[in-house]
Image: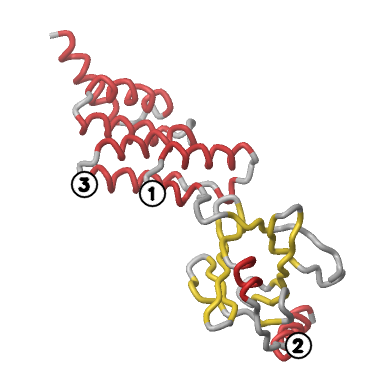
Amino acid sequence: MKTFSLILFFFLIVSCSNSVTYSDDHIQQTSGRYLYGPDEVLEVYYENNDLYLSWRSVKKIKPVIIDENTFFVADMYKKLRFVEHNNQRYLSVVNPDDEDKVTYDYLKISDTTYIPSEHLAKENFDKALEGYLSIKDQDDTDYLVDEGDLNRLGYNYLREKDYQNAIAVFKMNVALYPESGNVYDSLADGYLRSGDSLQAFTYYQKALEINPGNSRATTYIETYNNSANN
């Protein structure tokens, strides 16, 4: 019964789609990036006076237009509304049980305000880490970058012999996942390949403390100690 109701609701929304002519001022005020989550952006743009969204992997979503400020997005199954509060623009999620209620859900941000994943893509590692640590402090781990993804990124840099960026990424992983032995192992590997044997020794020791079964760390530490004693 619930599924049927949802399908009926969607059908009614689509059948009510309206044609709206947007003013230049409206387009200017509402176009742009909205913070959909701590590390996620929803983009609003217009083409030939038609409203479109770019969200996640879908670059061109055409919503169902209700009125100048309100539209329904099937991909999200949400009705959204442009609102303004204290000279800031937002997208408000319309409550189907109380459509007059105004909430300020998704803040419009400037084109030069970057989320952590965008800083990471731009190789602004300090700012990316700062953003991810802020997310972690809020316990919003659903949006936290995956340890494995960061590790793979670091090794991509290692394969390119970009040791500086590889080590920077591995350090991010250490800061975000300090209880994981693998992040210290990878950082040690990064230092080793860059030619810094002392730092490699330091982080292999840490990796071994967390995971005594780490054979690579054990072998390196034994070899390092033997060479130091000779």
Q: Tell me if 15 is positioned left or right of 194 in this view.
A: right
In the displayed structure, would residue 49 be above or below residue 213? below
The type of residue carrying mark 3 is Glu
- Label 2 close to label 3 by CB (< 8 Å): no
The type of residue carrying mark 1 is Lys
Depth check, front residue: 175 or 227 = 175
Using a 10 Å C-alpha cutoff, classify the residue at mark 2 as few (fewer than 14 neighbours), some (14 to 19) or many (20 or more): few
User: Which residue is pictured at 51% across the width and 56% down the height?
Assistant: 111
User: Which residue is pictured at 60% across the width and 60% down the height?
Assistant: 34
- Label 3 close to label 1 by CB (< 8 Å): no
Using a 10 Å C-alpha cutoff, classify the residue at mark 1 as few (fewer than 14 neighbours), some (14 to 19) or many (20 or more): few
User: Which residue is pictured at 59% across the width and 42% down the height?
Assistant: 135
Image quadrant assignment for residue 210: top left
What residue is disc 1 on?
Answer: 122
User: Which residue is pictured at 17% across the width and 8% down the height?
Assistant: 229
Q: Position of residue 172 (x, y in %)?
A: 43, 36
In the displayed structure, would residue 17 be above or below residue 112? below
* Mark closer to the chain start, 1 or 2: 2
Q: Tell me if 100 is positioned left or right of 86 in this view.
A: right
Distance from the alpha carbon under mark 3 to that under mark 1: 17 Å
Label annotation for residue 12: 2
What residue is disc 3 on?
Answer: 160
Secondary structure beneath label 3 = loop
